[in-house]
Image (cartoon, rainbow, N blue to C red):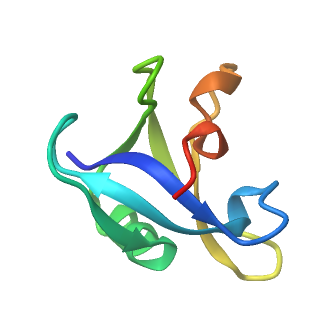
Amino acid sequence: MPFIHAVRVAEPGTRNEHVEAVTVSQLTNGPVRIATREAVHADIIRGTRYRTLHPVTHEQTDVAARVSSRGTRYVATVANDTETDNLLRLPRF
């Protein structure tokens, strides 16, 4: 299962739609590669399960594919009443 470790965001970087790319590994501690937001969105639509992995807290949560009202495809963490595991809380690269 792919794990998202960090995000690259466009300014102002305050919404999940601002995520442009993420770093992903197949294991929690494996080598990372850069994947675009669109590639991750397409993978999730095809059935691949992604999770975030925070490097300090080690919190994990599922990531879902979303589409904004303007038609922008993006990814976001599944709502679970925990702010610290949100996609935008991950380190930037």
- Camera-nearest residue between 8 and 46: 8
Q: Is residue 45 left or right of residue 86?
A: left
Q: Nearer the viewer, residue 52 or 33?
A: 33
Give the residue displayed 16% in from the left and 51% down from the top. 31
Position in image of residue 30 (x %, y %):
14, 44
Considering only vertical position in the picture, is 17 above or below 51?
Answer: below
Task: Note whether 30 is above or below 44 in the view shown.
Answer: above
- Residue 45 in sight: yes
**Residue located 66% across and 20% down the image:** 82
Question: Residue 41, image x and y in percent?
Answer: 45, 69
Instruction: Classify residue 74 by image quadrant.
Output: bottom right
Give 92 or 46, whichever is nearer the viewer. Answer: 92
Q: How many marks can you see?
A: 0
Farthest front residue in view: 93
Q: Is residue 69 left or right of residue 34?
A: right
Residue 66 shows up from this direction: no
Q: Where residue 37 sits in the image (x, y, percent)?
A: 50, 71
Identify the image quadrant of the N terminus: top left
Which residue is pictured at 57% across the width and 52% down the height?
92
On screen, residue 20 above or below 75? below
**Residue 10 appears at what percent x and percent y?**
72, 72
> Would you say 18 lies left or right of 20 here?
right
